[in-house]
């Protein structure tokens, strides 16, 4: 699920944190990922007990709360389907949901089966006092909306689409033994790190996904791997807010030799003209690609606010016990034992956090015969990458440093009174910008300015060039 091959590459830009660092945070939980993992786990180990997924949700929510993490479970809107979507995109959406729901195809029977499970989970979560909401369409998109408005601090999921929908902080939290144990090491992926280290903003990540292949465009462009995709971004990105289709269209037109070679073209860029990429017909100016870009940029979400999210409550022991006894064949003694174990663990975690010392976080050494304390810092280890990847990232960073200069609009000219321009003590003003579109005739000087602007260079004339894509 998500972008083809993206996790293996982004792993080196992740940060490993202790689960204790997430204390007093609120996390959106991709409910269908948990449901998929519980179903997959039962199939792997040959467990046939009905409603085992309820035990998974119960245990995982208890483990998170024991560590001071308040979960908000978010489920996909199973019945969502827009009448304006093409049949190809509808098929891709069904394929994605089939994967998220454990495979087996997307049929009415499977849909009813999933709905029945979610109804039981919803009843359990309500008895546990854990907020549970439904998305407008995709659960990851709704989780991103919750983080955007400040309701949650991030999302626990394994679907990279969370970033494509606008999410900022993704946490991979691993459980074992049916949720009875939680791995203290949590993998944190940050959009801030992607932007700072890789110069990859949301639009470029979506472009990357469409080149490699994603849930809504399976296969991507044949012959394009992660490093080649980064090179494409570095060569065909002009503006910071370039639209996805614009970047892809420049790449496609250049490879098809619809755009001429220029002296300023880098060897990497020239190489694209001879590569045998398997570019889909009409790429990227087809309904399928435009719809996929729109789904990521403008997802269907419900505008949840803090007041519309149920507040967390204490666990209702009686109702939870009855549900687990009825659905999971738990005995009363087993439930009491689990509750007692959970309470002891929670108390132990609180004590360990209260007794933590400053020396556990800061390493210091004291000179002999001196009261001066020297702090010891460990230099941050930089991720290792290939020469091609390094060159592509450096090119992206260089372009990013020029965006403020290129996009800066000139100051307005002083007003005319009766003809000549009034004298001013301020520095000389630049002339009005030249608006260049596909239909605007340009002079040779304007063409030179346009060329320089696309190459990230300065230009000699006094006018600014603004590209209308």
Image (cartoon, helix red, strand yellow):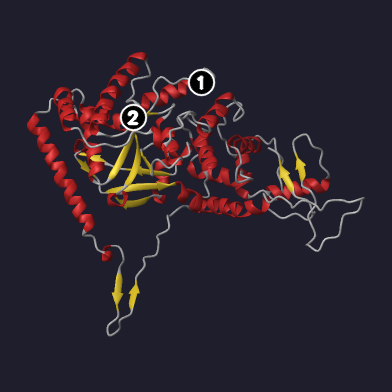
Cα distance between the residues tagged 1 and 2: 23 Å
| Quadrant assignment for the C terminus | top right
**Quadrant position of residue 357:** bottom left
| Quadrant assignment for the N terminus | top left
**Side (left or right) of 456 relative to 70:** right
Residue plotted at (60% across, 36% down):
248
Q: Residue 283 at what x, y percent from top left?
A: 59, 29
Given this view, does label 1 or label 2 mark the residue nearer the observer?
Answer: 2
Q: Residue 301 at what x, y percent from top left?
A: 46, 30
**Quadrant position of residue 372:** bottom left
**Foreground residue among 315 and 191:** 315
Residue 1 visible in the picture: no
User: Which residue appears farthest toward the top when viewing the image?
Assistant: 108
User: Which residue appears farthest toward the front when viewing the image?
Assistant: 307
User: Pointer 1: what residue?
Assistant: 88
Secondary structure beneath dot 1 equals helix
Residue plotted at (62% across, 43% down):
236
User: Pointer 2: what residue?
Assistant: 32
- The number of numbered discs placed on residues in the rendered structure image is 2
């Amino acid at each position: 699920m998500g972008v083809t091959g993206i996790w293996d590459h982004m792993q080196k830009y992740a940060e490993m944190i202790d689960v204790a660092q997430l204390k007093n945070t609120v996390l959106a939980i991709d409910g269908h990922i948990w449901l998929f993992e519980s179903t997959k786990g039962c199939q792997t180990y040959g467990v046939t007990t009905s409603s085992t997924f309820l035990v998974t949700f119960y245990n995982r929510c208890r483990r998170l709360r024991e560590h001071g993490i308040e979960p908000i479970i978010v489920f996909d809107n199973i019945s969502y389907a827009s009448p304006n979507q093409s049949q190809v995109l509808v098929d891709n959406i069904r394929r994605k949901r089939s994967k998220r729901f454990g495979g087996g195809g997307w049929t009415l029977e499977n849909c009813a089966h999933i709905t029945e499970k979610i109804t039981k989970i919803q009843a359990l979560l309500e008895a546990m006092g854990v907020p549970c909401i439904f998305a407008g369409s995709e659960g990851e998109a709704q989780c991103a909306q919750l983080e955007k408005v400040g309701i949650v601090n991030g999302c626990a999921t394994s679907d990279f689409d969370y970033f494509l929908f606008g999410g900022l902080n993704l946490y991979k939290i691993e459980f074992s033994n049916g949720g009875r144990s939680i791995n203290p090491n949590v993998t944190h992926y940050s959009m801030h790190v992607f932007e700072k280290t890789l110069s990859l903003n949301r639009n470029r990540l979506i472009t990357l996904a469409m080149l490699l292949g994603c849930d809504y465009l399976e296969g991507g462009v044949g012959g394009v791997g992660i490093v080649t995709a980064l090179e494409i971004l570095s060569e065909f990105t002009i503006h910071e807010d370039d639209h996805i289709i614009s970047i892809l269209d420049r790449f496609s037109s250049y490879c098809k030799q619809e755009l001429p070679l220029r002296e300023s073209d880098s060897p990497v860029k020239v190489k694209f003209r001879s590569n045998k990429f398997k570019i889909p017909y009409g790429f990227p100016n087809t309904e399928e690609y435009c719809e996929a870009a729109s789904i990521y940029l403008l997802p269907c979400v419900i505008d949840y606010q803090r007041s519309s999210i149920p507040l967390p409550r204490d666990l209702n022991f009686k109702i939870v016990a009855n549900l687990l006894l009825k659905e999971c064949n738990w005995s009363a003694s087993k439930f009491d034992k689990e509750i007692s174990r959970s309470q002891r663990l929670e108390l132990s975690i609180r004590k360990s956090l209260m007794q933590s010392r400053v020396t556990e976080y800061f390493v210091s050494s004291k000179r002999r015969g001196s009261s001066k304390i020297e702090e010891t810092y460990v230099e941050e280890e930089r991720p290792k990458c290939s020469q091609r990847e390094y060159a592509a990232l450096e090119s992206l960073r260089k372009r990013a440093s020029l965006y403020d200069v290129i996009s800066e609009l000139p100051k307005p000219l002083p007003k005319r009174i009766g003809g000549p321009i009034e004298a001013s003590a301020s520095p000389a003003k630049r002339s009005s910008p030249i608006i260049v579109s596909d239909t605007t005739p340009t002079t040779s000087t304007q063409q030179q300015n346009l060329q320089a602007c696309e190459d990230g260079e300065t230009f000699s004339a006094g006018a600014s060039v603004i590209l209308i894509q």
